């Protein structure tokens, strides 16, 4: 079975457990440090603007967007988008997230190879993620192993995207912590809070990568049950 429960579903249990924990951890940690106001009360947007300007990225715009924890850097339009709870507030959590996203802009400026590679494979990964299961399911039910193999190959691109995302995100967090310490935006004690926020967020990327890898393992197991 592919719909509902089948024996290969047990492969996904570690990733499901980690994903549940990661979501809970990131929300609770962000909420906790959202209530901690900086000794030097600058908002997330102000902190990001300072980081970008100091890096020679005055042409990168900062936009306020809706949604919760929807913050991201758009390398195509060179725009850093911050949610209201990050953009508008002078909290440890807000400044940590804003600095992390500014870190992506600096990665882009410096031609950071994992980021460039991830950006390059986005179209293939998106197509692979959408088409892989359709092809695999068709091949599974009609016993067309060629379609199953094609689905697995396409899903592999999505897995690669998730795996490459890990060094990109961890590097951006490392840059954020170093920059905030160097420019005096946060105190030593506040930096520990920033570290906890960013470490919690990193768990969500780790969970996504693990889920993708284990889903690929599951597809390979199902493919093995359909011998040529």
Image (cartoon, helix red, strand yellow):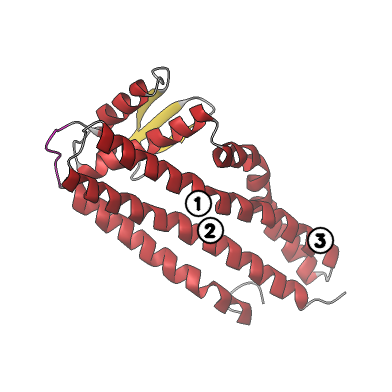
Which residue is label 1 attached to? 166
114 vs 46: above or below: below
Residue bounds of the magenta highlight: 36-41
Residue ranking furthest to the front: 182
Q: Residues within 10 Å of mark 2 (few under 14, many from 20)?
A: many
Measured as percent of width and height from the top left, residue 99 is found at 33, 36
Q: Is residue 84 visible?
A: no
Q: Residue at x 63, y 52 (%)?
A: 160
- The image quadrant of residue 44 is top left
Residue 147 has which mark?
3
User: Which tag is nearer the camera, tag 3 or tag 1?
Assistant: 1
Of the numbered discs 3 and 2, the one sitting upstream in the chain is 3
- Would residue 87 be found to the left or right of residue 119 on screen? left
- Would residue 17 be found to the left or right of residue 153 on screen? left
* Local SS, label 1: helix
Q: CA distance from mark 3 to mark 2?
A: 24 Å
Q: Within the magenta stretch, is there residue 158?
A: no
Q: Are marks 1 and 2 in contact (CB under 8 Å)?
A: yes
Measured as percent of width and height from the top left, residue 16 is found at 47, 69
Which residue is label 2 attached to? 209
- The image quadrant of residue 213 is bottom right
Q: Residue at x 74, y 57 (%)?
A: 153
Measured as percent of width and height from the top left, residue 134 is found at 71, 58
User: Which tag is nearer the camera, tag 1 or tag 2?
Assistant: 1
């Amino acid at each position: 079975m592919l719909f509902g429960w089948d024996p290969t579903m047990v492969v996904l249990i570690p990733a499901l457990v980690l994903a549940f924990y990661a979501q809970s951890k990131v929300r609770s940690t962000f909420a906790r440090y959202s209530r901690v106001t900086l000794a030097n009360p600058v908002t997330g947007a102000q902190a990001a603007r300072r980081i970008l300007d100091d890096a020679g990225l005055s042409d990168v715009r900062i936009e306020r967007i809706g949604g919760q924890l929807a913050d991201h850097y758009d390398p195509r339009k060179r725009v850093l988008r911050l949610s209201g709870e990050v953009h508008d507030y002078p909290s440890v959590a807000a400044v940590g997230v804003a600095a992390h996203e500014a870190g992506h802009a600096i990665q882009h400026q410096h031609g950071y190879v994992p980021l460039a590679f991830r950006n390059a494979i986005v179209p293939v990964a998106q197509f692979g993620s959408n088409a892989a299961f359709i092809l695999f399911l068709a091949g599974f039910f009609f016993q067309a192993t060629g379609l199953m193999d094609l689905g697995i190959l396409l899903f592999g691109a999505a897995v690669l995207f998730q795996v490459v995302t890990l060094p990109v995100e961890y590097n951006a967090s490392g840059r954020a912590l170093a920059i905030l310490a160097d420019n005096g935006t946060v105190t030593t004690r506040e930096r520990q809070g920033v570290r906890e926020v960013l470490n919690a967020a990193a768990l969500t990327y780790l969970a996504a990568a693990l889920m993708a890898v284990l889903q690929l393992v599951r597809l390979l197991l199902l493919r093995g049950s359909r011998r040529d």
